[in-house]
Image (spheres, helix red, strand yellow):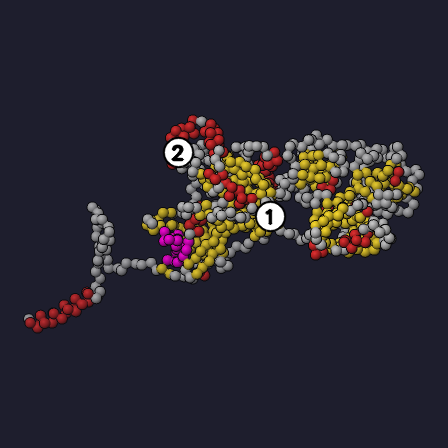
Amino acid sequence: MNNKIVLLVPFLLVLTLLIACGGAETYTPEAASPSEAPTTSPEPTRKPTTKPQETVEIKQVSIDEIQNIEWSWSSLVETQPSNQSVDPDPQKYTLVFWEDNSYDFKADCNVGSGAYQVEGSDITLQPGVTTLAECGPDSLYDQYLKLLDRVEAFEVRADILILNLQNDVGEMRFGNGGVVEKPEAPETCNTGIDPVSATVNIVGLPYAYQPGCIPGTPYEDDETPAPTGLSDHIQVNFSQVDEEGQISEPIIYIIPMTDYKQLWEEAGDETVSTSVESLQDLLREKLEPVQTSDIPILPMEQVSGDSDLQVQGKYLDITMGAGVRFVTRFSQEPNPVASNNPALFYIFQGFSSDGVYLITYFHPITTEALPLSQNVPDEEQEQVDKDFDGYIEEKTKELNALQPSDWVPDLTSLDALIGSLEYEKVQEEVTSPPPRMININWQLGELIDANPSTPSVVPDPQNYSLVLLPDGSLTYVADCNSGEGTYTISGNSISIQLGESTLADCGTTSLSSLYVTLLESVETYSLEANSLAFGMADEAGRMVFYYGGMAINPSPPEQGVPTATTLEAINVRGGPGTQYLSYGVVDKGTTFEVTGISEDGDWWVVKVPTEVAPDEQGWVTSEYVKTVNTEGVSVVPTPPLEEVQVPKPISSAPTATIVQSTNVYGGPGTEYPNYGVVSISTTAEVVGVSEDGAWWVIKLPEDTAPDGQGWLSAGYVEVSNITNVPVIPTPALP
């Protein structure tokens, strides 16, 4: 018995040690935190388990382990307070990190991209460009982008990507959607603007901004509240952090108007074209005060409701053009005007100086003069319900009385920001001259010395002329001499090589030798409506030529045909009289083939190139020509003089004043219907410009032109106030 007891004692000691060392499993309930208050209904004590509690493995991974994978946002878990606060649709919110340190994302109905920087497990996402369509009231688009902007670190737990947020406020969790390949970049995003060149002065506002070229999106008519669709365009996206740490997204659009209107018109929707025309009318008339309703707003991607309030209207001239700014909101239904809901926006709508681009700017804005929506008095809500139109009229007066500094941000600062917008057009390689530069009799009007900048007027411009021909050849007159040569063009550079010429002595006061020397030293050119300027080598000065009419270069007449040779420089006209259109001036000694004579015998009909007159008929006065073999030529009936009556332009409208009687056509070229002659000194209202800038489009009576528009060659007019005229697409030939 005693032996049994002795043997039992060591066994019990061993068993006790095994238990103490974990040889058998036990269960210890978790103790409550000392700060936790006792509860009246404590949870039941957990039953012991024979299986150890599972733990989730946290992996510190390198960036290459999460690249080229489509991660789908599955949840947002907040630590303050600790709960899962968002349960998004993973298919609508994705994120892909690419190996080139760029990332792409989908945020509901929008897509975008950016760049990221990594140091260990720390990561910073830098916003880039994004579409900004209205995705509906239940969208998490805004929240998703704001959260991405606050990401500071990454890790992986059980194949779940965790993006940790700044200040330990929570984490975004993403599911693994599989390996993906980076899509090829679009071949072109063609706006005619270098996106990197788009800059603004943020004038002290808390901004970072990113310009980019955004490929177009197709027209869609199933979006609410309105159809959407954009051509290729430039966006300047901003990221702004307000006093509460919230991020809002101001944005500037630069949209090529012709492509934008065409996109919608091809879908059978005239909304964009009508809005552009209405905005052009508004900016042309510039009525004061600025209207408080119906100011067009584009693009439709930014319109989320009815713009039922438009206040603080002001016309603005900006660096790249002009427009109008105002404050508005977008409402789904009649609501009190509050500072936060519906949100208020500063909006600018305008055009570039060349009429090519629509420029718009959207910026969230607020004012302490308005209550928060939750603090609107009951009596104000009653007024909204009873007489909404009267309520809006009252609020319009109230808000128009505020000063720019009563708004946040200050309206003056936002005006300055959009006013500072600058960009550069992409310089396309040009190897041929613009059409309105060739076949023109350019006459030297000024010589400008750069040091100092002193212009010298050339006394006899017609004695120093230049004609550039389409085949790269040229002819020139240098006082009593004349010659030929060639030229080459690349971009805005030009090189002239002179060839054979006469070498007569033109006298001590002649500029003949200087003119020839200067022509051979030109390096650049610039073309205005009625002038051609050459820049000299080493920026030594400029030669300024003025329009002297079409250059008429008749083919040499065949042997024995009737001819007329000019005794001095004269006009070739479209009929027998000075009231007819002048096709241009020909030099002394020019020989034409004669094809007829006027009914009164005072004018000869001569053969001219078809690019001068489609019927190949020009008229020269018999007083200044010498004829040979003209006996028996036919009498040509006097052509009708169809003078076009042009409506008087409205005040402040863009205008074109005719400096030399010219034909007005149904399109940008003589192959279009000829509506008749517009007389010298006539002033017409300009409604557009051709795509190449060589023709101005004017307003005509509809009984003259079915579409109410006529086209004038830029060489025959002087224009004014043309900042906002649109580019008119070339019409189809009838």
Q: Is residue 192 left or right of residue 157?
A: right
Give the farthest residue toward the bottom: 3
Displayed quadrant of residue 262: top right
Given the image, on which type of amino acid does mark 2 rest? Val
Q: Is residue 131 above or below residue 274?
A: below
Displayed quadrant of residue 711: top right
Q: Residue at x 46, y 45 (%)?
A: 248
Read off the magenta span: 151-173
Q: Position of residue 239 (x, y in %)?
A: 47, 48
Q: Is residue 116 above or below residue 11?
A: above
Q: Residue at x 33, y 48 (%)?
A: 81
Residue at disc 1, secondary structure: loop
Residue 692 belongs to the span the image colors magenta? no
Residue at numbered disc 2: 376
Depth check, front residue: 367 or 60: 367
Label 1 to label 2: alpha-carbon separation: 45 Å
Q: Is residue 161 left or right of residue 300?
A: left
Residue at numbered disc 1: 191
Residue at disc 2, secondary structure: loop
Q: Is residue 185 left or right of residue 508?
A: left
Neighbor class of circle 1 (other Cα within 10 Å; few <14, some 14-19, many 20+) is: many
Q: Are marks 1 and 2 in contact (CB under 8 Å)?
A: no
Q: Position of residue 175 (x, y in %)?
A: 41, 54
Give the farthest residue toward the left: 1
Depth check, front residue: 530 or 126: 530
Observer able to see residue 300:
no
Q: Position of residue 169 (x, y in %)?
A: 36, 51
- The quadrant in which the C terminus is found is top right
Magenta segment's dominant SS is strand
Give the farthest residue toward the front: 452
Q: Position of residue 297 (x, y in %)?
A: 54, 38
